[in-house]
Amino acid sequence: MDASPTSAAPPSHGPGPADAAHPPTHGGPPFLPPAPPPGPVARLRRLAAPVGVMAAVVGAFGYVGAVDPNEPGHYPVCPLLRLTGLYCPGCGGLRSAHAFAQGDIAAALGSNALAVAGYVLFAVLWVVWTARAARGRPMSIAASPAVWWGIGAVLIAFSVVRNLPFGAALAP
């Protein structure tokens, strides 16, 4: 009986069927999800999130469009308005959404112009998100702290101006 090293199994030359189940971990991220398969099924999966978000938004606007916030008792009153008599940046937002859903853009702007700007911004971002998802490209919104501070400053300025006598046109 010969127990020499020449009787051992030949060395492996590349990944075999057993190696395919356990890919090597050689410096790369260990838990990368597999790439989605090409074709219409992958596109539908990529579009699921933007379509789901739009379905929720359409449902919310449909509800607010059907249930008039100008009628008392359907929606709660803004707590800041009730406690202080001051309009917050969101005051008039439901009336604005109702008018927007009814197609009355002038009334929507009169109730809350900042909300209408938000609807337009949402629509633009949603279209970009959907187009990128259809192409398989990720969508990320990375805003610097200066942008967030700017958004906060706009909201505060809008709130202050709409509560002053010369800003009555911005009040709901």
Image: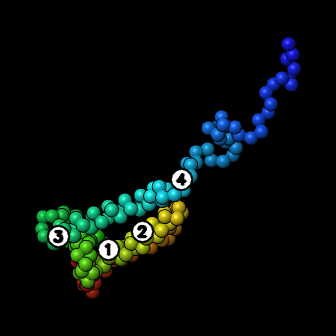
- Three-letter code for the amino acid on which mark 1 is drawn: Ala
Which residue has dot 1 on it? 115
The picture places residue 66, in percent across and down from the top left corner, at: 19, 68
Q: Earlier in the sequence, mark 2 or mark 4?
A: 4
- Three-letter code for the amino acid on which mark 4 is drawn: Pro
153 vs 132, left or right, is left
Label 3 sits on a secondary structure element that is: loop
Label 1 sits on a secondary structure element that is: helix
- Residue 100 versus residue 1 in the image, above or below: below
The picture places residue 102, in percent across and down from the top left corner, at: 22, 75
Label 4 sits on a secondary structure element that is: loop
- Three-letter code for the amino acid on which mark 2 is drawn: Trp
Label 2 sits on a secondary structure element that is: helix
Label placed on residue 36: 4
* Gap in angstroms between the C-alphas marked 2 and 1: 16 Å
Which residue has dot 2 on it? 126
- In this view, the residue in front, 171 or 161, is 171
- In this view, the residue in front, 110 or 87, is 110
Label placed on residue 68: 3
The picture places residue 105, in percent across and down from the top left corner, at: 27, 81
* Gap in angstroms between the C-alphas marked 2 and 3: 26 Å
